[in-house]
Structure formats: structure tokens, C-alpha cells
Amino acid sequence: MHLFVYKCWLLLRSIFRPRLTDFSAIVTHTYWVTPFDLDEYIHMNNARYLNYMELGRFDLVIRSGFFRYAFKHKIMAPVVNTTIVYRRSLQLFQKFTVSNQLVYWDEHKLFVESVITRKGKLYCVALKELRMVQKGKATPLDTVMQGMGISLPELPFSSELIQDKQALIKQLLRHAEQKFEGKND
């Protein structure tokens, strides 16, 4: 429930903040670990890291103008893949920062890096792949960006890094399919 409150607060706050014209800008937010975030080990549940990262991405979507444009043109940008690495645990009432940045793009996809830090130390990093979809089909990213009046930035990540990540994910999917193929639930 508290994440719903955060999302409503973020929506109101984002409306009154300046529009992001630099699509590669780092969008940063600060939160505290609440009792609702804890798991049975009394530290922040691993799924909550993703929830807080999603709040930052939501702000990026609103302030860039994509939310309004996508709603008007019936375009979605669902997360189709997330790669996440946890380094440290967050404890109750600790203050932490979530940063989101567009780091790579291709014809139909955007890659957003989300980083959680506390006092200058890395706690978690994730790379989320989003696909532009309109009426169930992939939509060219250039068309969307032109419609929004935004030019895509120089990319901080190399295409080789993204391709390596995608190759690893394909291998993991193949392995899981082979391992569980034909098994009934």
C-alpha cells in the first residue's frame, strides 16, 4: 500500500517539476526502508528493490513527456527483461538513493540502468530492457522520439555489453526450457 502512496506522491510531484529534455539525464530519488519493505530476515526484501527502481522509472517517463504521448497514441513500454545484482542489504529505516538513467537503445528497445546506493556505496544495480509496443506490435523508437520532439542521446553503454547480456539471457532461457520441458506442474 505504501508504494501506491509513493506513486501518487511521485505523480503529483513530477507534474510540477521541470520537464526532462535530456533523455539520458540521471533521475534520482531518496527513500527510507520502512517496516513494509522487510522480509523474514529483517532486511529489505529483494522484490522491493525493484519496486523502488520502478518508482524512479515512473518519474523519468512522466517528466520526459513519454507518459502523455504514449497514452495519447496507445503505446506501451513494458519491461521485457531485468538483470539485477545485489551487493549489500538495506536495513530498517536506512536512507537510500535510487538513480535511473537511459543507457542504451536500439530500433525498438530502451535499456534503463537503475542503481541503489547508500552513503556512496553500491547496494544494487539493475539493467531493465523495455520494448516499444503499439497495438501488440513493436514500434520503431525513432518514430516515438520524433513525435515527442526528443532526440536520443549519446549512449554510455557499448552495444557489445548489451549484446553480451542478451546472449547470456538467451542461454539461460534455453537451459531452463530444456531442464523443465515436458514436466507437468
Image: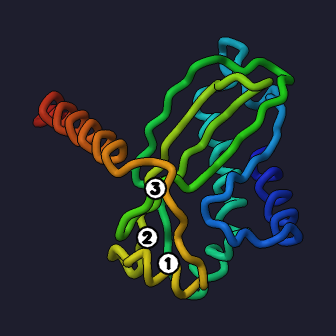
Q: Quadrant of the C terminus?
A: top left
Amino acid type at mark 3 = Tyr
Residue at figure coordinates x 68%, y 52% from the top left: 26
In the rendered view, does 57 fall on the left or right side of 16? left
The residue to which callout 2 is attached is: 132
Amino acid type at mark 1 = Ile
132 and 179: which one is in front?
132
In the rendered view, does 92 fall on the left or right side of 124? right
Q: Position of residue 54 (x, y in %)?
A: 63, 49
Q: Position of residue 179 (x, y in %)?
A: 15, 28
24 and 10: which one is in front?
24
Q: CA distance from mark 3 to mark 2?
A: 14 Å
Mark 1 or mark 3: which comes first in sequence? 1
The residue to which callout 1 is attached is: 75
The residue to which callout 3 is attached is: 104
Amino acid type at mark 2 = Met
Residue at figure coordinates x 76%, y 52% from the top left: 4
Q: CA distance from mark 2 to mark 1?
A: 7 Å
Q: CA distance from mark 1 to mark 3?
A: 20 Å
Q: Position of residue 91 (x, y in %)?
A: 76, 18
- Rendered image quadrant of residue 97: top right
